Image: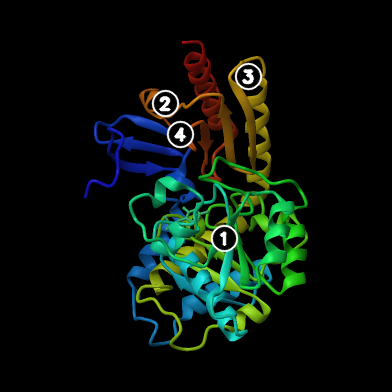
Amino acid sequence: MNTYSRLPVTFVKGEGVWLWDDCGERYLDALAGVAVCGLGHCHPRLTKAICEQAGKLIHTSNLYHIEKQEQLAERLTGLSGMDNAFFCNSGAEANEAAIKLARLYGHNKGISLPTIIVMERSFHGRTMATLTASGNRKVQAGFEPLLTGFVRVPYNNMEAITQVAVNNKDIVAVLVEPFQGEGGVNIPEAHYLQALRNLCDQYGWLLMLDEVQSGIGRSGKWFAFQHSNIIPDVMTLAKGLGAGVAIGACLAKGIAAEVFKPGNHASTFGGNPLACAAALETLMVINEEDLLNHVTKLGDFMRDGLRHQLQDVSGVVQIRGQGLIIGIELSMPCGELVKKALEKKLLINVTSDKVIRLLPAFVMQQAEAEQVIDITCSLIREFLNG
Ligand SMILES: *Cc1c(COP(=O)(O)O)cnc(C)c1O
């Protein structure tokens, strides 16, 4: 269907941070399949793990125990401090699970119209519940009626959310991204998550973090919440989890981990042996290649480099990010830069109209990062001066 306005290129091969099109032209990839391919393209260990699992067992359904799924749950709960996990196939599905969990949690407490607090400029997916939760009219328009049971507050604003708290007895949870990706690479102030944690504890709400984009190493820690001193009640993952193989997860802790009972939620494909083998190998490679440290260092290096080259360029509003999510906000819409970069054989993204977004693979080397910085800065200068 006509759901995408695609760029005029077809990639047929990938290796590390490089992609080749069907004419044999090579491109430098600073987007990694929109925060998915953290290990770069076709990391030999990931390819091997997928091939080995595909030769052994691909799918059996969740009617039976699945060894690799149990190992993955063990690993993810160990890394995060959460208690258990439900597996699905995408970020939207992971958030659907979280939303259903929060509603059931509310009903179990005798709240018949459970309400979830969501944020302005948030993005949680394209299913009916997740587009309702998203703070972006563009993903909602034309799909009304939306769901009920959500209230929206400004992101990174404790005053507004505290106001809502006093006036609404139906609230059961807060759903929030530790930093906003699609909404323009928005990093909240340092104590925001801690303040939300305190508020949730005070009112008995579930703190539900959408780590679909921020999780699995992107921020320089396994999960972005680990930059603060909290643990959420619910956390959702997808994008980078399978490094290109479709898998999502909803993790829960404490009282939230007890909410779902057999029959409450399910997925046919979710957590099958193939997807879990890919995710397990992804986590292993991130660990063994010490990629979290590399993400932190390379992210700082790239932001420094961008700031240095763009410091005197008027029209550059702010350069921000955490680890290897990098946003460069301009003073005017700059969507056309994506195509201009493509002509220079560089893959970048623009989100929220004015924010150039870089999401490189964790395996990018400094020399490659320098190329990304040089090309991006020359495109920005050209764009703002022309
Ligand atoms: C991409 C994204 C989603 C949606 O994930 P899909 O796999 O496309 O359904 C949800 N939340 C956040 C924060 C995302 O970045």
State how far apart marks 4 and 3 are (Cα): 18 Å
The earlier-in-sequence mark between 4 and 1 is 1
**Residue at horizontal 44 percent and vertical 80 percent from the top:** 265
Taking 305 as reference, is 352 left or right?
Answer: left
Residue at the spot of label 2: 341
Residue at the spot of label 4: 348
Taking 168 as reference, is 342 left or right?
Answer: left
State how far apart marks 4 and 1 are (Cα): 33 Å
Residue 132's quadrant in the figure?
bottom left
Residue at the spot of label 3: 309
Q: Is residue 199 visible?
A: yes
**Mark 4 vs 2: CB contact within 8 A:** yes
Discs 2/1, front: 1
Q: Amino acid at mark 2?
A: Ala
State how far apart marks 1 and 3 are (Cα): 41 Å
Q: Amino acid at mark 1?
A: Val
Residue at the spot of label 1: 151
State how far apart marks 2 and 1 are (Cα): 39 Å
Discs 4/1, front: 1
The earlier-in-sequence mark between 2 and 3 is 3
Q: 342 or 66, which lies in front?
A: 342
Residue 230's quadrant in the figure?
bottom right
Crowding at dot 2, Cα within 10 Å, few <14 / some 14-19 / many 20+, comes out as: many
